[in-house]
Amino acid sequence: MRWQVHSERSLFADPWLDIRVADVELPDGRRLDHRLVRTAPGAGAVVTDGKERVLLIWRHRFITDSWGWEIPLGGIDEGEQPLVAAAREVEEETGWRPGPLRPMLCLQPTNGFSDSTHHIYRADTATHIGPPSDPWEAERVEWVPTNGIRKLVESGEIVCGTTISCLLYLLLESPPGGAAPAARAHPGTP
């Protein structure tokens, strides 16, 4: 059942987001004002090292006042390709340059509230180039064993929806100790 949008207008906008109200008609004919947020897309990467470890950042999120492990992820600059943005974000947030990137997932983590889209790529190698250029992004940068991901999710040390989705997908692609399947494109990837 499809909701019909009759109009949409901005309530507040800045370079980061646009808070809007949409006049929508539900399938039963009722109409309501629905709030939504429009944002620019983001890009990030899941980077592994061949030792069954994944590169993660430990950071504080002031909005939820919580700490957690996350994949490197950030905004796509105007005119920048998502793949280039993903590589840049990994370098800026971790100090590691990812090896060749390939599409992994394309997510809309809050699609009932926002049109935010995250283009996620995958790299099997990385080269350390120095300290992160954005040191305020993370308290720590670490290679975390993939066999501990489930426990980190269960303990609440990984709560970011995009990170959970990507890491669980990583485990499905190549379970710890198992052989990785051949790389393939996934529907909806950039």
Image: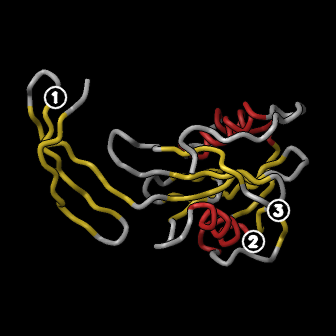
Mark 3 nearby-residue class (10 Å; few <14, some 14–19, many ≥20): some
Which x, y percent locates residue 83?
62, 61
Callout 3, which amino acid? Ala
Q: Label 2's element?
A: loop
Callout 1, which amino acid? Leu
Q: Label 1's element?
A: loop
Residue at the image point whose x is 12% and y is 43% from the top: 6
Alpha-carbon distance for marks 1 and 2? 48 Å
- Residue designated by label 2: 95
Q: Mark 2 or mark 3, which is nearer to you?
A: 3
Q: Quadrant of residue 138?
A: bottom right
Q: Earlier in the sequence, mark 2 or mark 3?
A: 2
- Residue designated by label 1: 26
- The color scheme shown is secondary structure
Callout 2, which amino acid? Gly
Alpha-carbon distance for marks 1 and 3? 49 Å
Q: Quadrant of residue 112?
A: top left
- Residue designated by label 3: 126
Residue at the image point whose x is 15% and y is 56% from the top: 9
Q: Nearer the viewer, residue 146 or 175?
A: 175
Contact, CB < 8 Å: mark 1 with mark 2? no
